[in-house]
Image (spheres, grey):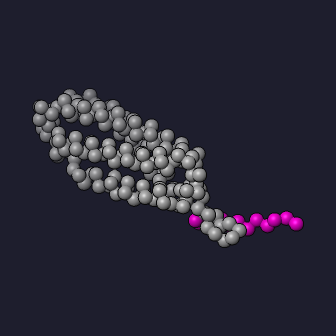
């Protein structure tokens, strides 16, 4: 006699023969991370290219909100942001690679990427506030802090993450 396969697809994942939910695959809230990584990748590349195109203009035009003593710091900030956007694009592409291959390293790499986003955001916010308080505020930092504080515990505790990235 043959064995009857009783697995049924559900919106949460699969249901095994014992009628237990099996959280496997890049579904559910992991799709939000996937789409967020793709949007972040495109956004960082766009911003990096935009900084590259506007760099000469930004560095040559005097701004009323920047003291002459802070011009060099402003120039370094422009180069730093441009470099960081390329670096983050590469890091996001690597993270997507590990996610799509269902690597067991993905949760760790994603947590490191989130912490990197947070640290870079803090550095750029402080640097910009020091140069020109009109350009930045701490309110720009709040969404990043909320995303990091929600996603890291989810990546650590989620059954779906544990079952998908073995």
Dividing the picture into quadrants, the one containing residue 54 is top left
Dividing the picture into quadrants, the one containing residue 51 is top left
Residue 65 image position (x, y, % from top left): 13, 40
Which residue ends up furthest to the right in the rendered image? 1
One can see residue 61 in this view: no
Task: Using the image as rendered, state which of residue 165 and residue 129 is in the foreground.
Answer: 165
- The structure residue drawn at horizontal position 26% and vertical position 28%, both measured from the top left corner, is 56
Instruction: Inspect the magenta stretch and tell me whether residue 75 lies in it.
Output: no
52 in relation to 9, above or below: above
Where does the magenta region start and end?
Answer: 1-12
Residue 80 image position (x, y, % from top left): 30, 34
Task: Using the image as rendered, state which of residue 15 and residue 27 is in the foreground.
Answer: 15
Query: In the shown orientation, is residue 143 left or right of residue 98?
Result: left
Query: In the shown orientation, is residue 159 left or right of residue 56?
Result: right
- The structure residue drawn at horizontal position 70% and vertical position 65%, both measured from the top left corner, is 7
- The structure residue drawn at horizontal position 19% and vertical position 29%, both measured from the top left corner, is 72
One can see residue 109 in this view: yes
- The structure residue drawn at horizontal position 33% and vertical position 34%, both measured from the top left corner, is 82
Query: In the shown orientation, is residue 2 left or right of residue 145?
Result: right
Residue 116 image position (x, y, % from top left): 37, 44
The secondary structure that dominates the magenta segment is: loop
Which residue ends up furthest to the bottom in the rendered image? 19
161 in relation to 44, above or below: below
Instruction: Inspect the magenta stretch and tell me whether residue 10 lies in it.
Output: yes
Residue 140 image position (x, y, % from top left): 27, 51
């Amino acid at each position: 006699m043959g064995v009857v396969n009783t697995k049924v697809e559900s919106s949460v994942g699969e249901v095994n023969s014992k009628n237990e939910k099996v959280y496997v695959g890049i579904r559910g809230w992991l799709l939000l991370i996937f789409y967020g990584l793709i949007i972040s990748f495109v956004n960082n590349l766009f911003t990096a290219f935009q900084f590259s195109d506007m760099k000469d203009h930004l560095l040559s035009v005097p701004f009323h909100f920047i003291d002459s003593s802070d011009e060099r710091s402003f120039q370094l900030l422009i180069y730093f942001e441009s470099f960081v956007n390329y670096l983050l694009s590469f890091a996001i592409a690597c993270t997507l690679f590990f996610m799509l291959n269902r690597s067991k390293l993905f949760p760790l790499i994603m947590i490191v990427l989130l912490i990197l986003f947070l640290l870079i955001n803090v550095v750029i916010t402080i640097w910009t506030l020091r140069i020109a308080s009109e350009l930045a505020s701490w309110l720009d930092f709040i969404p990043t802090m909320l995303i990091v504080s929600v996603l890291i515990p989810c990546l650590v505790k989620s059954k779906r993450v544990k079952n998908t990235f073995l």
